[in-house]
Image: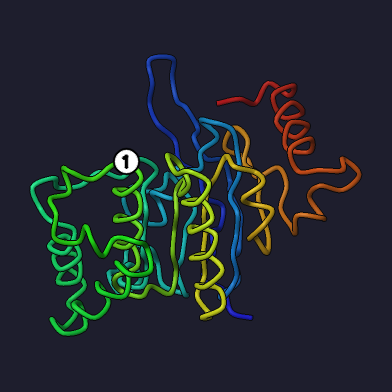
Amino acid sequence: MSAALEIDGLTVSFPSGKGIVQAVRSLNLTVAAGSVFGFLGPNGAGKTTTIHVLLGFQSPTSGSARVFGRTVSDTMARDRIGFLAENPDTYGFLTGRELLGFTGRLFRMEKGLISRRAGELFASLGLSSAADRRIASYSRGMKQRLCMAQSLINDPDLLILDEPTGGLDPIGRREVRRIITERRSAGKTVFFSSHELSEVELVSDRIGVLVAGRLVAEGTVDEVVGPAGNLERRFVQLVEEESGKGGAA
């Protein structure tokens, strides 16, 4: 199976008042095309920094990252990505339909295709009745679903989600799981970070645990959990073990 994501020796460092902080440390990771990868870690582990490198928002200090064989700085690589931020916010003066239209044009999509995709996404995410309302009138959960629609407008080959269930009720979380599994069924790749370990277990083919910028475990859920018995217990063990080494960033 070909690789959707290839991360080799990725290191990201930032200056701080106390010196240099290494947000990501020599990260090596490969994600197969057509799979779902859950990216786990406590707050400050470096998950969002890694995602920002994949999106071209952040330059690595060293190492490299490729999307479908192309460096992440390549515009053609980014054209194949859809992204949902951890705390999505957008232009409140636009309607939902206007936002998806604007996004589709950024991807150089034809007007008719944008209209069809937007209609499908509004229906799929339960936003049809709100499509022509100003986004400022949307609830937090509605904004989350709208930004999910925005991330899908270009039918991306790689969907990157940063804490996609934040602010969603149980029904909303179920919808996110449905979208993830549908993307995989369509042969697409999903790379997502989450603190909701139960959600990760339900949909992920493989997972990785990042602690203090280091990848401390990677594999199927069963491989990572091992004798710990459940993912939450193993996750806590991994965090505590790495913290005990004094490696927290």
Image coordinates for residue 196, horizontal then vertical, percent: 59, 42
The residue positioned 13% from the left and 56% from the top of the image is 95
Quarter of the image with the C terminus is top right
Furthest residue toward front: 129
Quarter of the image with the N terminus is bottom right
**Viewer-proximal residue among 119 and 46:** 119
Density class for disc 1 (Cα within 10 Å; few <14, some 14-19, many ≥20) is some
Image coordinates for residue 77, horizontal then vertical, percent: 35, 71
Residue 159 is left or right of residue 87, and the answer is right
Quarter-wise, where is residue 114 in the image?
A: bottom left
**Viewer-proximal residue among 238 and 178:** 178
Under tag 1, what secondary structure?
A: helix
The residue positioned 81% from the left and 43% from the top of the image is 230
**Viewer-proximal residue among 35 and 143:** 143
Residue 66 is left or right of residue 211, and the answer is left
Residue matched to label 1? 140
